[in-house]
Amino acid sequence: MSDLIGKRISERYEIQEMIGGGGMAHVYKGQDIILERSVAVKVLQPQYNTDEEFIRRFHREAQAATSLAHPNIVNIYDVGEEENLYYIVMEYIEGETLKEKIQKQGPLPLEHAVQLMEQILGAIGHAHANGIVHRDIKPHNILLNHSGDAKVTDFGIARAASAATITHTNSVMGSVHYLSPEQAKGGRITAQSDIYSLGVVLYEMVTGSLPYTGDSAVSIALKHLQEPLPLPSEKRPGLPQSLENVILKATVKDPHERYESVYAMQHDLKTVLSMERRNEAPYIIPADEDATKAVPIIKDDNGNEDETKVTKADTTVHNEPVNTQNAAAPPPPPKKKRKRWRWILLFVLLFFIGAAAAAFTVLPNLLKVDEAEVPDVQNMSEDEALQEIEEARLDGEVETVYDDEVEENHVVGQDPRGGTSVKVDSTVTLYISEGQEEVEMPDLEGVSRDRAEEMLNDYESVEYSASETSEYPPGQIIEQTPKAGENIIAEETTVYLTYSTEREFSLGNLEGESREAVERYLENNNLSGSFENSHSDNVENGRVIEHSPGPYSNVKEGDEITFVISEGPEETEESEEEEENPSEQVEAVIPVEVAENDEEEGRTFDIRIVYEDATTEEEATFIEETISETKTYRVPLEVTPETDGYYKLFVDDEEVQSNTFSYGDE
């Protein structure tokens, strides 16, 4: 069908190139010229255009798939028919298939394999909840986009479970390497058949190879029926026993011994790599009671029939013709009276005629089982749904699942779905919502803030608050709400975290202090210091001339303060100017008290101190800041006999205190 390339279907979809195909259809990459997006167009092969059965199956795929909406299932956009061309328009996934990834990479990292399988199980679980069995699960039908997410596609042989089950006589549907034993036998296909195929896919993901191989489809199908699954750990030494157990349970020959649902398998897989489970006891595969039963005819790749019977006493394949040429002629029957034989034959003939008549008239009526229509109970409460099922003369069976949208104790999905005709007393499985899944709140105390943000990606919101402390390293979580271990719904929970920060405080005025006093101050406040020496005519030898940062600056624990220590005046003759212009330094101590109730109410005050002395030509600002607690300021002033020094204290721009200092004041 390469002649489709370059054509436009339905005046909307331009066919660009072929990207795949199967037994029923070809798949092309196309462009939706209306929505301006790439699409995948699946077109039924022309040899089936006149085959009503294939067309019905093709339409069934579209109808089944359009009822599904899941992030890990390929979306169906459109379905149509144009001049004997039957097509489905789907989401285009740019990437590779899971099969291609395994062939290129080999065994996948266990974390990645488990992550992908959880996505695939979520997709198939959604289909099962909507009454759809895939029937052809294999890595070829699992696409991986550029983000690495899995997208399940090709429900081409899927069939709504509402149409009951189907028996494919003498044919093997789907890829034989992933075929469940009941599919190989032409038996009843259920959700457990998909679980078997999922187990084989997981086997291939972690080992890089298939469990069964053979020269023909028949030989591989027989291995699925008869041979135990080779242990994955034999192909990948060191494989956790917990992960091997999941594979073994999913691929048990008896469907009833597998996981009861895809959700159960998904739940088991969530903790499969935890340290607590890595060395759990091996899963014991139940004995296969069907091992002594006859295996029906299965056609090989050339359409030839191969009938095999397996018994405990004899595992020989009985398919040899009988050689009659050399057999001895049987002895002639003894002569009996012809008349007597005529009456016997007539009696036998009449008996079989009567038995046949009864078989076609009386027995069907005796053996006929009434049918019932499955009610649609979607979104009903559990009690209402079970009552509806019971009134329809059916048996209701409940399985609970987590669901973000459907209210707790209400029906998420059902199998078979509403409107299906089934036998009276058949079982209808109801998937009941447990609401959103609760998770255990992680323990975040002691981890860094960045790590906490990574761990809380799925939560509604996270609010942070800082706490000054010297007990913990900066940026470490020291308190959390909710507490670790509490069960919460992540999408509805706001997490409150308190993290540690370095303590910030106002540096005292250390000018004029001795070096020993400075070192004690640094030690008590977790500060470090560096010291320089300089001559000073005003500061006594061994005392601080100045320091940086300066007095009353805000500092944090661990900060380094630089001090200049006086070495006294240089040894020079005193100048006449110094004698004529003596000066002295005084220190104004200004306590500013904040009342206790103001502190509790969190009130703040704007502080401004101005001064003038012999060193200034006009009034200068000493400090200007906002405080919320009591604080003491020390203002150094230089005065001479001719020049006084003074300061003024303003609180909220109102002068509340002032003082003047003169030369010689004590």
Image (cartoon, rainbow, N blue to C red):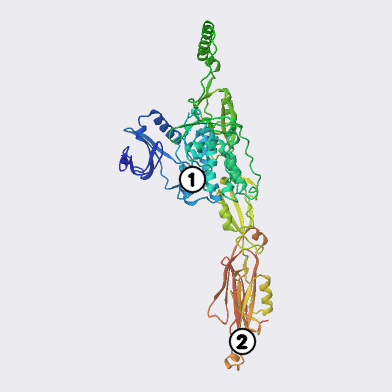
Circle 2/circle 1 CB separation < 8 Å? no
Q: Residue at x 55, y 41 (%)?
A: 199
Q: Camera-side residue: 152 or 194?
A: 194
Crowd rating for badge 2 (residues with CA inside 10 Å; few <14, some 14–19, many 20+): few
- For the residue pair 541 and 242, the one nearer the viewer reads as 242
Q: Earlier in the sequence, mark 2 or mark 1?
A: 1
As drawn, the label of residue 150 is 1
551 over 582 or under it: above or below: above
Q: The C terminus lies in which quarter of the figure?
A: bottom right
The picture places residue 3, in percent across and down from the top left corner, at 30, 40
Q: Secondary structure at mark 2?
A: loop
Q: Position of residue 340 (x, y in %)?
A: 54, 6
Q: Is residue 63 visible?
A: yes
Q: Which mark is residue 262?
A: none
SS type, badge 1 = strand
> In this rendering, would 628 be left or right of 161?
right
Residue 533 against residue 9 in the figure, above or below: below
Q: CA distance from mark 2 to mark 1?
A: 81 Å
Instruction: Please give the residue where the numbered disc 2 appears in the rendered image.
Output: 537
For the residue marked with disc 2, what is the amino acid?
Asp
Question: Mark 2 or mark 1: which is in front?
Answer: 1
- Residue 565, x across and y down, in percent: 63, 82
Q: Is residue 629 above or below residue 665?
A: above
Residue 407 versus residue 475 in the image, above or below: above
Q: Amino acid at mark 1?
A: Ala
Quadrant (top left/top right/bottom left/bottom right) for the N terminus: top left
Residue 271 seen in render: no
Q: Nearer the viewer, residue 243 or 164?
A: 243
- 548 vs 152, left or right, is right
